[in-house]
Image (cartoon, rainbow, N blue to C red):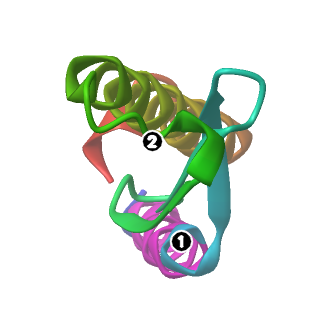
Amino acid sequence: MMAQAQRMQAGMLKAQEELADERVEGTAADGLVKAVVTGQGELIGLTISSETIDPDDAEILEDLILVAVKNAVNESKKLSKERMDALGIPGMGGLI
């Protein structure tokens, strides 16, 4: 039983390390705004096409950024869940 718990812990640590190296992205407005996050949900990149920048309407750009970041974080959560489920640990995906 103890050996199984140690294997599970080692698997979780390995999955965490791998997720830290993974990159997923979320987009808005057909890719005009793109957010990149790690597999752990850390925002590491944001690309905004010049086409979306309207100095007279910053609110639209703000909304597009939020959508792109939320989409990227959701993709990260899905990836994390898949990795944890593959280890036989359902429900742990949101914890790493």
| Kind of element beneath mark 2 | loop
Quadrant in which the N terminus is drawn: bottom left
The label nearer to you, 1 versus 2, is 2
Residue 78: x and y in percent read 60, 30
From the viewer's perspective, tell me whether residue 46 is left or right of residue 65.
right
Which residue is pictured at 64% across the width and 34% down the height?
27
Tell me if residue 65 is in the magenta stretch: no
In the picture shown, does residue 14 fall above or below 39? below
Name the dominant secondary structure of the magenta segment: helix
From the viewer's side, name the closer residue of 83 and 59.
59
Quadrant in which the C terminus is drawn: bottom left
Residue 48: x and y in percent read 53, 53
From the viewer's side, name the closer residue of 71 and 51.
51
Name the image quarter holding residue 28. Answer: top right
| Residue type pointed to by label 1 | Arg
Which residue is pictured at 59% across the width and 52% down the height?
50
Q: Is residue 28 visible?
A: yes
Which label was assigned to residue 53? Answer: 2
| Kind of element beneath mark 1 | helix
Q: Is residue 92 visible?
A: no
Name the image quarter holding residue 58. Answer: top left
Upstream in the sequence, badge 1 or badge 2?
Answer: 1
Residue topped by disc 1: 7
Q: Looking at the image, do the residues carrying marks 1 and 2 touch, with CB atoms under 8 Å apart? A: no
What segment is highlighted magenta in the picture? 3-18
Which residue is pictured at 55% across the width and 67% down the height?
19
Residue 89: x and y in percent read 51, 36
Which label was assigned to residue 75? Answer: none
| Residue type pointed to by label 2 | Ile
In the picture shown, does residue 1 fall above or below 65? below
